[in-house]
Image: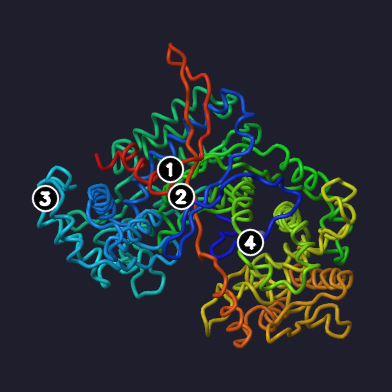
């Protein structure tokens, strides 16, 4: 599962403080449409051993080799269209300031960013602002050899297919359609072909064994199609669908295996290669279990068909890769927290019956991303928790990671965007946030993940699913409150994690401002709050506002017609956090569904339309792109005369178009 994908401003981090070293690093690459492309730094790469650097390089190559797969998964014409658009882009020698050309260039950049013709987040088809005549003229200007024709296809036939794909808004209108009579036939992605939703459901119902306690992840690595009237699965593996790309991935994984850090890692890379070779999902489970148990290797990676958000039925995995290494220093922080899990639990402000007598801290690590690939590129998450198979998570646990250098890049690139000046009440609060928000925000995430979710216990006989549709909202609320409560505990200063007992105020201010106001920016006018994390934040902020009214701990005030959060008494706010935590834990522990519904309905869902409108209006005045993503750094090996790698250098100079064109040229096994 992906964590807290930052879509608009990184929902949380809005500025950066003195805790992070000031950097002479250029995070900003370019802006177009609703996108901002950034680059991220890979601090610590130079301190890796040569063997580790070599491993990162091999794994990065494997990550690039799967790029074509995600393009094809997103839509069956994407690869051919990309080739055609890039050929035009490289051949064009007309007026580069003309409206048509500029619109064409923007469109190509959007298509690169979406790994296809649909927006990466909304999955709506991009709307070209250049004319069809311009496009046709450019295709006609291409030498015949540069036309990406399929076997036996003429130019006219290609254009009959691709012109509507670009220009007709009714053709392949939405990549993933969750809101239709038939979510399969109305989605333009390429995970199913010629089958209806009913046929897909019948097919999987027919092969699933409801009594299997350790089921494979059905459909994870296959396309479901109809052949001669029969529904069949075409699996992704070496001799099946995407075989040419998988062969290259296997090649680089084999290289990586030879420089693995230990036998355990070497063994599960071998299992992963077996899985890619055969397509056998039992092998994938075997690999996932061994990978989950490897907590020793510093260099780590994900490479495969993983997240299923791109499938309206949530089965087929989108191909992705993350190459990373452990941020040892920052992981020390999560280690300290997890080592002290019992100390915190014993002091949790909830009824003693609801505390856990023996806590096992979840070991989470902080990582440095080294390469993003497939569905994790260019847009990416700031944290991941894998594997996804429920029975593996229950029996063998999962790995939870925070990607700190990505979070840092978002924060650094946000500096000076005017957000704090617009929404934070005064200079004093801004300065405190400038100094402490970065560290307290990370710490809040650590406490939420390592301790919050694992804290507390149910009374005997209480159904864990008693909160039904509000289950995830209440659970996220509980974890956030636990984190907020202990963020203000002097223990963190004692442990050496914070250097100022008042640091927590930065996160408190941001949390309440976000929950009451700024997160409304992600909501369309007229809509209510739906997503579980957003409901959780509003629930907490509104409850505290209301219960802090009498003491004036928190207020909403107007200054020159604008609304601001004003916190008069942070100690009181912490007390309220403790009270609400105690109540939320009681609801969960006792299974009090009615009280849960009341809490959610009273605080979490409804939006004040006037305040909503004001927030949207104020956001619109800021110079902020709604969506952001990254270019990858390049890893450049040097060799001795015998062909052995003697060093790997990391290079940050590549631009966006340059990188996309290089990847298409050097890493496109499915289009050659
Ligand atoms: Zn959570």
Location of residue 648 in the rendering, given as x and y in whole percent from the top left corner = 52, 27
Instruction: Determine which residue is flagged by label 4.
Output: 416
At x 37% / y 53%, what residue is drawn? 112
Instruction: Determine which residue is flagged by label 1.
Output: 281
**Label located before the other in sequence (4 or 2):** 2
Q: Which of 569 and 177 is in front in this view?
A: 569
Instruction: Determine which residue is flagged by label 3.
Output: 153
Label 4 secondary element:
loop
Of the 4 image quadrants, the one containing the C terminus is top left
Q: Nearer the viewer, residue 341 or 21?
A: 21
Distance from disc 1 to disc 2, alpha carbons, whole Å, reads: 25 Å
Label 2 secondary element:
loop
**Label located before the other in sequence (3 or 1):** 3
Q: Do the residues labelled 4 and 2 touch (CB within 8 Å)?
A: no
Label 3 secondary element:
loop
**Label located before the other in sequence (4 or 1):** 1
Location of residue 197 in the rendering, given as x and y in whole percent from the top left corner = 33, 66
Kindly tell me whether mark 4's CB lies below 8 Å from ligand 1: no
Q: Nearer the viewer, mark 4 or mark 1?
A: 4
Q: In this view, does 35 lie to the left or right of 399?
A: left
Instruction: Determine which residue is flagged by label 2.
Output: 377
């Amino acid at each position: 599962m992906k964590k807290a994908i930052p879509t608009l401003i990184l929902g949380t981090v809005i500025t950066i403080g003195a805790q992070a070293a000031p950097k002479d690093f250029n995070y900003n690459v370019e802006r177009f449409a609703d996108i901002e492309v950034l680059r991220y730094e890979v601090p610590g790469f130079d301190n890796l051993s040569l063997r580790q650097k070599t491993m990162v390089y091999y794994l990065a190559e494997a990550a690039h080799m799967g790029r074509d797969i995600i393009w094809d998964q997103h839509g069956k014409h994407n690869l051919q269209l990309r080739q055609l658009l890039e050929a035009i882009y490289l051949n064009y020698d007309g007026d580069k300031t003309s409206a048509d050309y500029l619109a064409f260039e923007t469109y190509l950049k959007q298509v690169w960013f979406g790994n296809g013709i649909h927006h990466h987040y909304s999955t709506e088809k991009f709307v070209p602002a250049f004319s069809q005549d311009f496009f046709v003229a450019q295709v006609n200007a291409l030498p015949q050899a540069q036309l990406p024709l399929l076997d036996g296809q003429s130019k006219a036939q290609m254009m009959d297919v691709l012109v509507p794909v670009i220009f007709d808004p009714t053709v392949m209108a939405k990549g993933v359609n969750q809101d239709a009579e038939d979510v399969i036939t109305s989605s333009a992605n390429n995970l199913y072909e010629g089958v209806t939703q009913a046929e897909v459901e019948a097919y999987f119902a027919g092969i699933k064994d409801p009594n299997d306690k350790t089921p494979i992840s059905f459909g994870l690595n296959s396309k479901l199609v109809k052949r001669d009237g029969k529904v069949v699965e075409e699996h992704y593996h070496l001799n099946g669908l995407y075989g040419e790309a998988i062969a290259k991935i296997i090649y680089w994984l084999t290289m990586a295996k030879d420089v693995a850090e230990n036998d355990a890692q070497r063994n599960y890379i071998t299992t992963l290669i077996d899985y890619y070779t055969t397509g056998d999902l039992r092998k994938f489970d075997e690999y996932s279990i061994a990978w989950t148990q490897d907590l020793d290797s510093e260099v780590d990676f994900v490479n495969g068909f993983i997240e299923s958000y791109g499938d309206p039925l949530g089965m087929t995995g989108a191909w992705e890769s993350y190459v990373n290494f452990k941020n040892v220093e920052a992981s020390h922080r999560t280690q300290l927290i997890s080592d002290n899990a019992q100390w915190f639990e014993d002091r949790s402000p909830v009824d003693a019956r609801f505390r856990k007598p023996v806590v096992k801290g979840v070991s989470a690590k902080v990582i440095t991303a080294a390469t993003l690939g497939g569905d994790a590129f260019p847009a990416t998450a700031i944290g991941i928790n894998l594997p996804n198979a429920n029975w593996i998570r229950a029996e063998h646990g999962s790995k939870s990671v925070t990607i700190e250098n990505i979070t840092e890049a978002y924060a650094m690139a946000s500096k000076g965007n005017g957000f704090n000046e617009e929404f934070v009440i005064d200079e004093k609060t801004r300065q405190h946030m400038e100094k402490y928000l970065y560290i307290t925000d990370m710490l809040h995430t650590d406490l939420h993940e390592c301790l919050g979710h694992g804290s507390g216990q149910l009374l005997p006989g209480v159904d864990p699913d008693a909160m039904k549709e509000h289950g995830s909202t209440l659970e996220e609320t509980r974890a956030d409150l636990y984190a907020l409560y202990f963020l203000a505990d002097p223990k963190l200063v004692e442990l050496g994690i914070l250097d100022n007992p008042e640091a927590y105020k930065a996160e408190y201010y941001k949390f309440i401002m976000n929950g009451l106001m700024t997160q409304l920016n992600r909501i369309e006018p007229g809509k209510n709050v739906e997503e579980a994390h957003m409901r959780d934040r509003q629930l907490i902020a509104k409850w505290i506002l209301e219960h802090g009214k009498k003491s004036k701990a928190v207020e909403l005030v107007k200054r020159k017609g604008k609304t601001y959060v004003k916190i008069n008494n942070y100690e009181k706010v912490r007390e309220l956090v403790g009270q609400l935590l105690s109540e939320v834990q009681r609801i969960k522990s006792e299974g009090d569904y009615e009280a849960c519904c009341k809490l959610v309905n009273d605080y979490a869902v409804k939006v004040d339309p006037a305040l909503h409108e004001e927030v949207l209006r104020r956001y619109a005045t800021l110079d902020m792109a709604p969506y952001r993503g990254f270019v990858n750094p390049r890893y450049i090996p040097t060799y001795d005369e015998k062909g052995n790698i003697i060093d790997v250098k990391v290079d940050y100079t590549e631009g966006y178009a340059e990188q996309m064109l290089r990847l298409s040229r050097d890493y496109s096994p499915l289009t050659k």
